[in-house]
Image: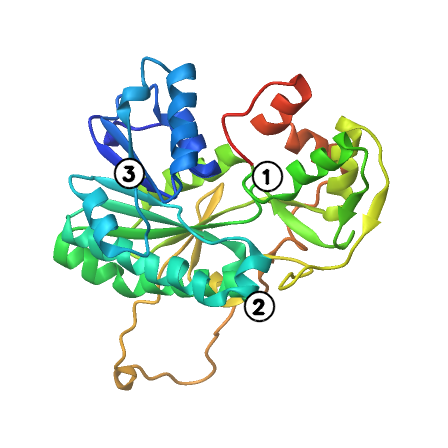
Amino acid sequence: MKITDSFRGKTLLITGGTGSFGSTVLKHFLDTEIGEIRIFSRDEKKQDWMRHSLQARYPDAAAKVKFYIGDVRNPDSVRDAMYGVHYVFHAAALKEVPSCEFFPMEAVKTNIQGTDNVISAAVENRVQRVVFLSTDKAAYPINTMGMTKAVAEKIVQARAQVAYDRAGTVLACTRYGNVMCSRGSVIPLFIDQIKRKAPITITDPEMTRFLMNLDEAVDLVAFAFEHAEPGDLFIQKADASTIGDLAKGVMKLFGETECKVIGSRHGEKLYETLMTREERLRSSDMGRYFRIAPDARGLNYDKFYVEGSVRTEGEEAYTSHNTTRLDVDGVVEKILTTDYVKEELEGRPHLVEA
């Protein structure tokens, strides 16, 4: 990741900063000339663990990192942490699909109300840029996690122009697929099952998922930071694989074990969508990424009139079924790009908790 001069001497706040994404951002930013990085989360145990890990591994740079205990559900704690901040990466979320299915109002409070609280605090403090992290599950959502993240995206888009006009704050979103070896992801589970000589549990061998590593997730956020106009949404062109081939790839590296098909979990899809057909009409190809502009029309539809047929959607959505499909060898090559897998193979401790 190329860190631009934009961050020199500036203060960056990461909500949900003790998670996998926050840990990877630190890896990219600590040896730069950034002024300060604020880690905002409600988990004091993870904050303490991260603080000691940074002091042990990056003693010369650890002082740049400040820790704030708070919750995006609490607007006062968000406001306090936001004071003096130039940029925000908003990663705080409830993201476990089954958990959100059983506790939907908790997902609403964190993913929807929390996002609105971050926007309000950013505007109040005249933050320059805020990049919100979303998920492919927000496109054609069928589960609570995806639905709440979809609403969070809509809140960003709805408030983006007013935020810019009122405070010069640019709000933008990123949307990405499965981030390998992030918290709650399946690869660490497979590795643990192999090490315990237990069967690998596969929901559906033909289910497909996009595959990104944590460094790519940070790169996407950095690209959005550099190129966003108010309300923009960015996605990365990503490879995918079947869950069956993903399991075979992990076993190729860590050893063979039995595979047990257990069926889909609550709220799971057969494949994921990164860009809908409707969004394709507003998208532009930027090479490695797609930019999706917001719908700039207002509520007064009377002034819009058309003659003849009108296109309301593109040819097809961009999904994990129709993107580049990796075979088992491709999966092996892809998962070897993650620090977690390399550290597991070498028997080293992790800086990022999966």
Report whether residue 121 is seen. Answer: yes
Q: Nearer the viewer, residue 227 or 106?
A: 106
Image vertical order of residue 62 relative to residue 143, above or below = above
Among numbered discs 2 and 1, the one appearing first in the sequence: 2
> Where in the figure is residue 7, as x and y percent of width and height?
25, 30
Give me the residue at 32% from left, 57% from top. 73
Place residue 98 in its image quadrant. bottom right
Cα distance in 3D space between marks 3 and 1: 27 Å
Q: Amino acid at mark 3?
A: Tyr
Tell whether 298 sits left or right of 256: left
Among numbered discs 2 and 3, the one appearing first in the sequence: 3
Cα distance in 3D space between marks 2 and 1: 22 Å
Q: Which mark is residue 142?
A: 2
> Where in the figure is residue 27, as x and y percent of width and height?
42, 25
Among numbered discs 3 and 1, the one appearing first in the sequence: 3
Q: Residue furthest top?
A: 60
Give me the residue at 58% from left, 46% from top. 178
Q: Amino acid at mark 2?
A: Ile
Report which residue position mark 3 lands on: 68
CB atoms of marks 2 and 1 within 8 Å: no
Cα distance in 3D space between marks 2 and 3: 34 Å
Image vertical order of residue 224 relative to residue 171, above or below = above
Q: Which mark is residue 103?
A: none
Give me the residue at 27% from left, 86% from top. 302
Report which residue position mark 1 lands on: 180
Q: Amino acid at mark 1?
A: Met
Q: Nearer the viewer, mark 3 or mark 1?
A: 3
Secondary structure beneath dot 3 equals strand
Give me the residue at 81% from left, 33% from top. 197
Sort mark 3 into few (<14), some (14-19) or many (20+) by Cα contacts within 10 Å.
many
